[in-house]
Amino acid sequence: VTLRNTVALLLAAAAAASAAPPPAATNAPENGILQVLVTYQRYDSRLPWRRDRPGTREGYGVVVGPGEVVTTEDLIRNHTLVELRPTRSGVKLPATVRRSDSQANAALLAYAEGDPTRALRPVALAPRIAKSAPVRLVQFDDSGQPQTSEGQVMEIAVASLPSGPGSLLTFKVSTEMKVGGTGTPVFQDGRLAGLVMRYDRDEQTCSVLPTDVLRRFLESPTPTASCMAHAGFVWAPLLDPARRAFLGVTDETGGILVLRTLPGSGAAAVLKPQDAILDWDGLPVDPEGYYEDPDYGRLLLPHLINGRHAPGDTVRVGVVRDGRRQTLSLSLGTYDDRRALIPENVEGRQAAYLVEGGLVIRELTADYLQAYGSRWMLSANPRLVNLYLTRAQLPETPGDHVVILSGVLPDPVNVGYHQFRDEIITHVNGEVVRNLDDVFRVAEREGGIRRVALHSFGVDLVLDAAALPAANQRLAALYRIPALRQRAAAPAGASAPPPRRTE
Amino acid sequence: MTSRGILGAPFRLATLLALALAAPNLTAGPANRARLSVVKVYSTVQREDYAQPWQGGGPGSGTGSGFVIAKRRILTNAHVVSDARFIEVQRDGDPTKYQARVLFAGHDCDLAVLAVDDPAFFQGTRPLALGTRIPALNDEVTVLGYPMGGTRISLTQGVVSRMDYSPYSHSGVDSHLVMQVDAAINPGNSGGPVMFRGRVVGLAFQGIPGAQNIGYAIPLPVLEHFLRDIEDGVYHGYPELGVVDLDTRNPALRRDLRLPGDGGVAVAYVDPFGAAAERLKPRDVLLTVDGHAVANDGTIQLDGNTIEYTELLERKQWGEGVRFLVWRDGSSRVIDVPLRNPPDPFIFRYLYDRRPEYFVTAGLVFVPLSRPFLATLGSDLNTPSAQSLLYHSQYAKVDGLYTNREQFVVLAARLPHPINTYHEPFESLIVHSVNGQAIRRLQDLPEALGHPTNGFHVVTFEGTDDRLVVDARAVPAADREVMARYEVTQPFRFEAEEAP
């Protein structure tokens, strides 16, 4: 059950093939910055037809094309209103989210060009970050006046996303400026080097989403899928000499160990558990999973997978299998959260659900468990937490999800059942249900749910079929449920969120 | 769904803070006579060291209270004398301390009986008589004992505020009847009598830190149960029916079960180690218990009171029977259940007066999963490996995790040595197999390690695909070095049989 960082999931992106066009040297980068004002509203984790109170976030975006602004995805997550404020101005212009990619933590906003935005100029993206050269951070003061501050690149490394479990290339900048929002642009030589994702007040450092990822996002040919490549395997370091000898990896000095491949992934097609990966895309991988990146030096494997290639690319992978060296050809895909047994739902999309006789039925997701607070591993139902920690990415058959009885809304029709909460549902009306679609199918075919079987519980919860229609109406009115049945929304604009502990 | 949890362990008197003592009115009266029989218990305790099980823990000392009962015995709390290495008792006003020893300890009900071999101790004492009935709410009671804040006996008065069914924190698992009183009860009161009209109706035992005017006592029925249990010279403990049930208040459920009348509770889960195993099954409906009709919410009427049917079972001794009228498959039948359980290694009580099992090789310390071992993990249990251990301890039976196992064997710790430098990720994980052999209990380890896989020991764990690999030829030398460096006096300790 260990979730060591080394067993973190790899998403991949590759260095941009085409170099950015040379910037308009006369254009000061301040002329391409907008403040992004977001009103957002999350869904209630337990009662998915409810929404939490709206909140606001402030951050920044950078003009990258006519009427187009790039910012971080976590800034605009669950937005109900996005507004842009140009420099030296109190004007707030409405904007729309054209697409977003939570695995790249990037979003593209659009606004109508007109008078207040006339002075805005697109900013060119830097080809890459130079560790030696200084950077400049820009944000607005209260009057909308740009404030700039020098910064220094401290570290370029693969790190976990601050608001999601994936890992990607990130650089750390130290600055004396008190950074006030995500998306704060970082410039190097007058070009956009990245957007601030998080600011650490104590350390006075920012973690910055690099230009490499932004470019990949902006140039992505498929707006509905993530731009980040995903291989689909879980690995561990291969340092232990006994382990290496046991696997017959004796002639080599490098290599990491494949523990598991994810069903349906590119890795599942060619890699096997206990393979030792010696090189990836021609670059040797050391026993801790580091490689020597041509641009950035020593980096962890995730960037080799998702930083140097795009989904659809094929890479050559050198392995030792059963003591023999082989070269395999692995095709990179994208991570699709909905294929997981227990999806992450980092974007906090509305859960599909069904309320029947007051029984609230839905699928288990990571965000549902994490809504139990910072100690969710102890606070949430132990069976559900254990299933998530050990099997989240491993449906027994494709399409499997965990259907749960989230809770019971008390009503005379469900008297005697009020205590049930976070139980796994195995059968509905006597039929096995593998996901919520199965529940919908049974409920629609049979005109309702009369009987629910729970995991490890030998008595079915039985509902009075004749009383159900009236009870459902009563419940909907009493608890003010606008829809008793809500199917999954079609996948919005881009991507699904990154999974946790696979590469 | 589990009836016994591993979390939510309450509190003990020993954790309470001091309060000023009430000044007793020591005039002649029943309470004043009783004080001659209330003794202070001094015990030096040595807990086991579950983190380094080859050595004992550091000894510590504490005090509690107790009182003389018939046959020259002293009744006190089990938690006062558990893991004791040396016990003395002292009467109020007598400078002499007499050595005492534990005759019986009931850890599931936190009661113990002590003997004092020197007959001089009992001169002038009179056994306190147990009451004939539980006092009613608001009846005034007196608590006697030796709480902190002074050295001599203390009497405090209060009323019975509540009778409830609550967890007993000493075992961390069991729940029994508890009497709540508003008299001051403080650390050191543990084991002292609660008197009503000159008779013992309870024994002070635990409190809630921070709460005011709440003290808990073990009430008369539990004291009587314990004393009757040990009459044959052996403490058996409370039998456990082992049934999870569901109310049948829902009319649709009643129709589905084709239930006649309007009572009964439906059996939803039968504990394989419970008394009802093999006798009751899911979808059975319990209509009567020993002739008392079970209502659809699980209560029965007894002596004019409404109580849970399980409370009736609480009054039974180990080996007695209970008769159910059971509705099964559309007809009723009588089913007799003898109330005795096989030893249950998956109940995860706190363990006392027994030495821990362990096995050390290659600097890897293996132990069976136990409640005291979980306590060594410290306060940060919000980690995946701790979560897995807690899940296994709570859901072992109900989720079938115990199947083909007698214990969960855990890689508890690593005594660092070059042979195990890279094995840190496996700490706190449950062993699945060693060299291809399933590990059902700790004793399986030496046998499985006798058959290396191509010269290596390969260990697999629950919840991860990662494996631990050790060069088998390097183990004997590493064992010698680890044993010497960390002063592991014995490389293993196995227990032949679980004590009941």
Image (cartoon, coloured by chain):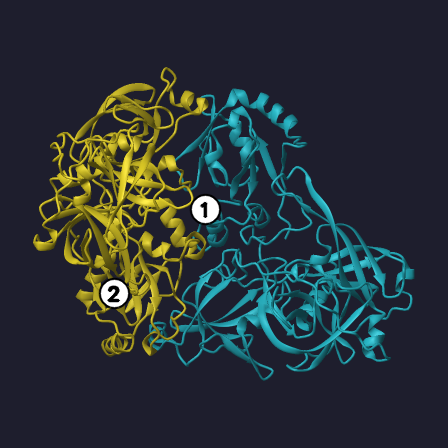
Chain colours: A yellow, B cyan
What is the CA distance from the residue labelled 1 to the residue labelled 2?
32 Å
Q: Quadrant of residue B261?
A: bottom left
Q: Amino acid at mark 2?
A: Leu
Residue B78 marker: none
Q: Nearer the viewer, residue A76 or B49?
A: A76
Q: Is residue A227 visible?
A: no
Q: Quadrant of the N terminus of chain A?
A: top left
How many residues crowd around disc 2 within 10 Å: few (fewer than 14), some, or many (20 or more)? many
Give the residue at x 42% y 25%. Answer: A239
Numbered disc in front, either 1 or 2:
1
Q: Quadrant of residue B204?
A: bottom right
Residue B383 marker: 1
Q: Position of residue B155 (x, y in %)?
A: 77, 72
Q: Quadrant of the C terminus of chain A?
A: top left
SS of the residue under disc 1: loop
Residue at image mark 2: A354
Give the residue at x 14% y 39%. Answer: A27
Q: Amino acid at mark 1?
A: Thr
In this rendering, position of residue A348 left or right of residue B357: left
Residue extending furthest toward the bottom: B304
The residue marked by circle 1 belongs to what chain?
B
Q: Is residue B42 visible?
A: yes
